[in-house]
Image (cartoon, rainbow, N blue to C red):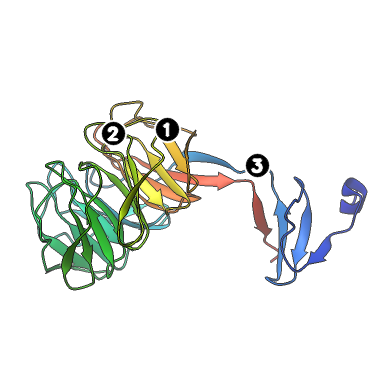
Amino acid sequence: MATYKEINGQKIQSVSSDPPASFTGQVWYNSTSGDLKVNAGTPVGAWATGGNLNNGRYSGGGAGIQTAALYFGGFPATANTEKYNGTSWTEVNNLNSGRGYLAGAGTQTAALAFAGQPSTANTEKWNGTNWTEVNNLNTARSNPGGAGTQTAALAFGGTPYSAVTELWNGTNWNTVNSLNVGRSSIAGLGLSTAALAVGGSASKNNTELWNGTNWTNVNTLNQGRRDFGGAGTTTAGLVFGGTPGPGDLTELWNGTNWTEVADLNVSDEAQRGCGTQPAALSFGGQSDADATEEWNITGGISTIETS
């Protein structure tokens, strides 16, 4: 069997940082991180089917990451809460106020649920076991965008076509600078200091970037839509599904532009999402209400497991 040196013309190198221009198949040892790494080729993303929800629904609130997600509320109007472990969903304690068209922020063990339909200012905090009602939004609404954590969240837009933005400090909501374009059914992603407000009613392709103080219009979606899922950050984002169709459309944000990438397996609307751009989760939907899909990127620079 040919050796690595015979195939590539050199031994595996020990370097202090990853080479800036490695070739596909190149292997090296990063002495700073202590990892054996490989260039596995051009990164490619794809959706794969995950475990179904126990209680199929749409337009709920989501929080967490791909392997530790939380889904709460949704339509038909429910207080149901489920958590995902990367394989299957488990029912846990319900919201105090059942509703759909709400937003969420945070993690599987420390989440925040706010707003909802009928138009409400209700806010609830999840401690990993139970939901507790906390101080309300200043402006009641349904279908806003949400971003951030349980102690530092952002709520923006909502029905009726609102531009209102509020910042949560762990105790209270404070009204801050508004969106440039008022709308609802927005996909929100990022943090309370660096968020994206994407799309919305009526079928807009607007994208706005929040820097902790103001919203700025940035490059638009390729396909304007509403009622869809989002995941990631302001430099590596992902949005998927929605209406008007195609409801399987996925777009990737690199911090400057949106690019169409691999489609969802199920075409739908009113999905919710969480996670990162390399490892996102889509769950629920109006047509296939118990569907779950996992987004993963293969290729690029990766670490070789040696034990």
Residue 279, compared with residue 228, is above or below; it is below
Amino acid marked by disc 2: Lys
The Cα–Cα distance between marks 1 and 2, rounded to whole angstroms, is 24 Å
Residue 223, compared with residue 182, is above or below; it is above
State left or right for residue 174 relative to residue 34: left
The Cα–Cα distance between marks 1 and 3, rounded to whole angstroms, is 22 Å
**Image quadrant for the C terminus?**
bottom right
Q: Which residue is mark 2?
A: 204
The Cα–Cα distance between marks 2 and 3, rounded to whole angstroms, is 32 Å
Per the image, label 3 sits on a secondary structure element best described as: loop
Q: Residue 100 placed where, x, y %? A: 15, 47
Per the image, label 2 sits on a secondary structure element best described as: loop
Q: Nearer the viewer, residue 21 or 132?
A: 21
Callout 3 crowding tier (Cα within 10 Å): few <14, some 14–19, many ≥20: few
Callout 2 crowding tier (Cα within 10 Å): few <14, some 14–19, many ≥20: many
Q: Which residue is mark 1?
A: 265
Q: Residue 54 placed where, x, y %? A: 26, 47
Q: Give the number of the disc on residue 42.
A: 3
Amino acid marked by disc 3: Thr
Q: Residue 167 placed where, x, y %? A: 23, 63
Q: Nearer the viewer, residue 233 or 271?
A: 233
Q: Indicate which label's residue lies in the foreground, 1 or 2.
A: 2
Q: Give the number of the disc on residue 7.
A: none
Which residue shows up at 53% across the image and 41% down it?
45
Confirm whether residue 69 shows in the render: no
Callout 1 crowding tier (Cα within 10 Å): few <14, some 14–19, many ≥20: some
